[in-house]
Image: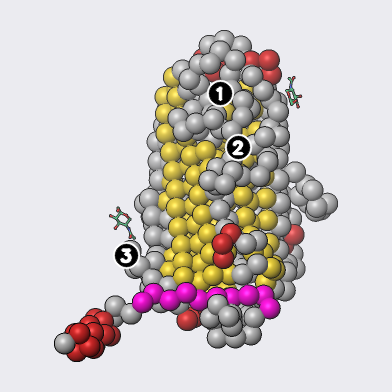
Amino acid sequence: MHSIHSVGLVAISALVGLAQAKDIYVSPTGSGTGTSTSPYGSIQSAVNAAVAGDTIYLRAGTYKPTTNIQFKTSGTQAKPITVRSYQNEKVVIDGEGLPGTPYGLDVSLPNGERGIFHIEKANYWKFYNLELINGPYGIYARDASNNYYERLTTHDNYETGFQLQGASSNNTVIYLDSYRNRDPRKNGESADGFACKEGTGEGNVLRNARLWDNVDDGLDLFMFGSPVTLEEVYAWGNGFNRWGFSNFNGDGNGFKLGITDNPPANHVVRNCMAFANAKKGFIDNGNPGALTVERNTAWNNGDVGFNFRSSSSTLKSNIAAVNVGSAQVSLVSSVKASDNSWQGGSWSNSSFVSTDPSTLKQARLTNGRVPASDFLVPKTGAAIGATTKADV
Ligand SMILES: *[C@@H]1O[C@H](CO)[C@@H](O)[C@H](O)[C@H]1NC(C)=O
Ligand SMILES: *[C@@H]1O[C@H](CO)[C@@H](O)[C@H](O)[C@H]1NC(C)=O
């Protein structure tokens, strides 16, 4: 009886596709078939072999692909496909050997070559704990929705570190560190830490990210026509010419939140910090939407803290202090401002418990978050500005 029953179950499983999700292994020194004892040597082989529900484990070391890794298939909501470092081993994917690192001045980068990971029309993927360096973009995801990216590091790429583009919805990017990305191809005009550009789609979120020392802006939402949610995002040191580019084109804003021809996009920016950027802290850049901008801090930037010239945004309980512009803020009259630092009291470095960002720059905690500190916490204890100490 028992064996007949089992045979029946196996047959039914095969018929309705209840096969066990499989684990696929890759190692920089592998040359096998993707098992734990005989891992693949190529990440692309693992991606090609994966179906909904599978997990790809990358073993420790530095991968040096000579063609970029293309994600073209999808998981499902119930069975995403996961790519992660095995037991949090240190995995680096070095794109220096790919085309476009860099192309010549003003030569355009073909779409398919963008990104060490090029994720196009691929949905329900999850990525964890990977470092992508020296590529033609680190992550480039286009027309891709319902993907989840946790604890990725994208640095020293030859374009933006992490970019979402096109028809893209419901992507979550959490615990991203993106730094020192630059674009010799355009003398610094367009490499940001994080960008969500030229597209539409609800439900995209960037949370607890650090974006620093990028050549252009920390973050850019150029021509993205739907609300993006930004929470606990820290942008500093962006827009300086650290590479000796001639005709330097870096913009140097912490958060660039649209563009004049944008469809109105009502982004939400909460508990974020912009400091020590070359130019402005937060700008709507002409976005005609109604953004919600609450509990953010712009400190010690090279121009005004908040520049909202076109939007009918709501700015509530933000701090602009010690910025070196003609004023702390520059706001059109359509902006609804309340309880912000510039609406009462005088603010200087001595208004804060600490102006030392060194804790914020340290390694992330094991839970993924940036270490908390008193950096830019007001001495008064008032519920104003951003803090690394809590969700607000
Ligand atoms: C995004 O999520 C919302 C809410 O769950 C859902 O209605 C919408 O269909 C999703 N969009 C896509 C492209 O999956
Ligand atoms: C405030 O502190 C920062 C960091 O120490 C410093 O760079 C800046 O010059 C100070 N600004 C003023 C006005 O004291």
Circle 3 packing at 10 Å, graded few (<14), some (14-19), many (20+), is: few
Q: Nearer the viewer, residue 272 or 333?
A: 272
Residue at left offset 74%, top offset 59%: 184
Circle 2 packing at 10 Å, graded few (<14), some (14-19), many (20+), is: some
Image x and y of residue 302, in percent: 70, 32
| Residue 389 lies in quadrant | top right
- Part of the protein shown in magenta: 20-29
Residue located beneath label 2 in the image: 371
Queried whether the magenta region covers residue 24, the answer comes back as yes
> If the image is split into quadrants, where does the C terminus sit?
top left
Q: Nearer the viewer, residue 288 or 110?
A: 110
Label 3, label 1: how far apart the Cα atoms are: 42 Å
Residue at left offset 64%, top offset 19%: 353
Q: Quadrant of ligand 2?
A: top right
Question: As displayed, is residue 64 above or below residue 12?
Answer: above
Label 3, label 2: how far apart the Cα atoms are: 33 Å
Q: Residue furthest left?
A: 1
Image x and y of residue 5, in percent: 19, 85
Residue at left offset 50%, top offset 62%: 127
Asked which secondary structure carries label 3, the reply is loop
